[in-house]
Amino acid sequence: MSIFRGEKISVEIFGESHSKKIGVNCTGFPKLKIDLEYLNKIMERRKPSKNAYSTSRKEPDEVNFTFGVNNGYIVDDYFSAEIENKNQRSGDYNNLYGKPRPSHADFTSFTKTGNLNFSGGGKFSGRMTAPLCIAGGIAKQYLEEKNIKIYSYVSQVGKVKGTSYLQSEITEEQILSKGENFALSNQVEMEEEIANAKINGDSVGAILECIVYNMPTGVGDGIFDGLESKIANLVYSIPAVKGIEFGSGFNLASMLGSQANDSLYYENGVVKTKTNNSGGINGGISNGMPITLRVAFRPTPSILKEQNTVDLVNKENTTIVIGGRHDSCVGIRAVPVLECAVALAILDETLK
């Protein structure tokens, strides 16, 4: 099990990629009527598709609330939901016993548990983002009822760049206009980048951006209780995330203070900033501007190319070729997952 313990809510994810079921236990959530259609749309966005970048593993991801929900309403301080795994194929990994896959958690989990069976990703698998989306989807629904809107999109795949908030302000209307596309621009070129990697038995990484609109001021706190700290904590719970920056992020390091500072001004009695280099957060507290963040996803470690590794049983060097079904670009299906992770962090802070 893996547990996020916030100030007001806790989220406990259980199961593994090839176990009979996976699920989530949640406490401290608002007692609201769950919009099942809304939640199912989030689950559908996360599921594998027929596109080149997606795994061929097909799961219905039907959410079954087993406790604390009655007629669609959260009626208890604690609720639980499960998803049945129906399409796992552990046999695809029989040749990997004792042979850790490069850049997976196989070797590090072995050093912790001694387990040599590297069947699927276990509790480290991207499959475990499905229960995260159950909790995050409910959090996102609650926040939208408070007019706090959270959107993500892909701004870069491999070397192909699309629209980014670093270039100019992105409105909510722009994001909504993309429909079911995962990017605001250059999606065809991004899909070609993924397809070329797949043809070569390889994978490719991505950068996702997330924007939170209508965020009220004064949410968060300093040091360990900062809003950036909590968001980063939840975002790093998504497998394959290797970097995060808020606002102009690392670009701030090459600016002068006079360039980086966000000047304040009044507009209709409301304090705003002329730029948003800080990404809507100062001192760990929201300043009322949109919260903006960029997240780097590594290329999927499971590739069809032969790779060097070790045989932990015979204690010798060896090579492996990974079978199974894997995404050629894990960042694409992570778009709704990122929204859900950010929603959980903001929900916990807004309930204080």
Image: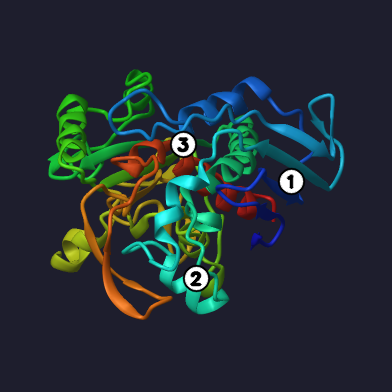
Q: In the visual, does 98 lie left or right of 133?
A: left
Residue topped by disc 2: 109
Q: Residue at x 49, y 73 (%)?
A: 110
Q: Is residue 255 above or below residue 272?
A: below
Query: Where residue 96 sits in the image (x, y, percent)?
Result: 40, 59
Residue 149 shows up from this direction:
yes
Residue position marked by numbered label 1 in the rendering: 29
Q: Are marks 3 and 1 in contact (CB under 8 Å)?
A: no
Q: Nearer the viewer, residue 290 or 24?
A: 24
> Which amino acid type corresponds to the residue marked 1 in the rendered image?
Phe
Q: Amino acid at mark 2?
A: Ser
- Between the residue at mark 2 and the residue at mark 1, the CA separation in whole angstroms equals 32 Å
Which element carries disc 1, helix, strand or loop?
A: loop
User: Quick one: 105 or 192, which is closer to the camera?
Assistant: 105
Residue 239: in sight, yes or no? no
Q: CA distance from mark 3 to mark 1?
A: 20 Å
Q: Which mark is residue 336?
A: 3
Classed neighbour count for the residue bearing mark 2: other residues with Cα under 10 Å, few (<14), some (14–19), many (≥20): some
The label number, if any, that marks residue 183 in the structure image: none
